[in-house]
Image (tube, helix red, strand yellow):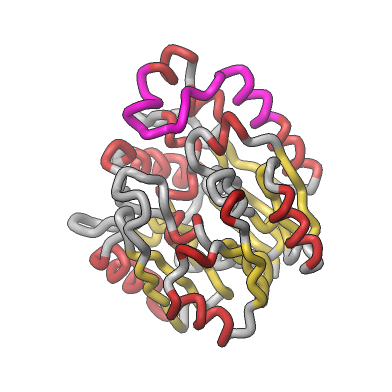
Amino acid sequence: MTAQSDFGTLRRVGMRHVRDAFASPAAIDRQWQDLNYLGAPEFEKAISEYDQLIDTLAARGLEIEFMPTVGEIGMDSLYVRDASVATARGMVLCRMGKVARRAEPAAQRAWFESLSLEIAGTIEAPGTLEGGDVAWLDERTVAVGHGYRTNGSGIAQFTQLLGDSVDEVIEVPLPHYRGPSDVFHLMSIVSPLDRNLALVYSPLMPVPFRNQLLERGFELVEVPDEEFDSLGCNSLALAPRTCLLPAGNPQTRARLQRAGVEVVDFSADEICVKGGGGPTCMTRPLDWLL
């Protein structure tokens, strides 16, 4: 078992139910524009989509730990990956680059302590680090995106907290793209699906990082332009070459299947597309079996 993976067999995962994150139609109306959602999620449809997702994960034997409501946290708390990173030394609590989410790491600390999980440390100001910018290429190699959500100080602190539990931390400069208000992380453009396979959106990938993946022997499955905004590149590995993919990405699905990947679709309009966060964003993996 390891915490340092993004493509093993997922055994235990932390999540926050959309019923708790979105709270009510009135709460959605108060928040969605300020949080830069594409539209106001429909509360009951979001719950239905999420419950179907939970059923899919439970049917595959995953142990799911649900985050309770602790403190003042809003709709974005649905995307639990961003506020923490699981490591061999324990949970690293992030400091959010998105100011509206600054309360989430403290809320996750209380949650992790209730689960008797070790806390390895906390990213402190002026550092910022978000879990969506952290992608494990193997259990001792981690890539970290340097962009609007994660800065150099955050990466340096994270590297220090990892200590000798890793061999290499690869800092990946991220593009400006749509600017600081956009939902853009390293895992927006790369999803590891096996030790030598990744789903990528190459038009936004830094050339040196893309070349590093190829030099490491990765096969790259390319997401087409027309399926990037529908979160075609945001795919959660449930096991090596088995992944969860938002519905509505038929070309990406076909390309993954040609690469020998089992693809599990799920409805995602309300819980993913409108908020810009896919299945990786909604899950905080805690234990992987390698």
Q: Position of residue 178 (x, y in %)?
A: 35, 49
Nearer the observer, 223 or 77 = 223
Establish if 277 lies above or below 29.
below
On the rendered structure, is 173 left or right of 116? Answer: left
Q: Tell me: residue 205, above or below residue 268.
A: below
Query: What residue is shown at x 49% (from left), y 15% (from top)?
Result: 24
Q: Residue at x 29, y 41 (%)?
A: 102
- Residue sitting at x 57%, y 33%: 271
Is residue 14 at least partly visible in the picture?
A: no
Instruction: Confirm whether the magenta stretch covers residue 211.
Output: no
The C terminus - image quarter: bottom right
Across and down, in percent, residue 141 comes to 50, 77
Q: Identify the residue at the far front of this view.
A: 226
Total residue callouts: 0
Q: Where is 269 relative to 41, above or below?
A: below
Asked whether 41 falls inside the magenta stretch, the response is yes
Q: Residue furthest bottom?
A: 215
- Left or right: 106, with 47 as reference point: left
Q: Quadrant of the N terminus?
A: bottom right
Q: Position of residue 31 (x, y in %)?
A: 37, 24
Task: Give, as a single range, the part of the protein colored magenta.
Answer: 30-51
Left or right: residue 15 compared with residue 175: right
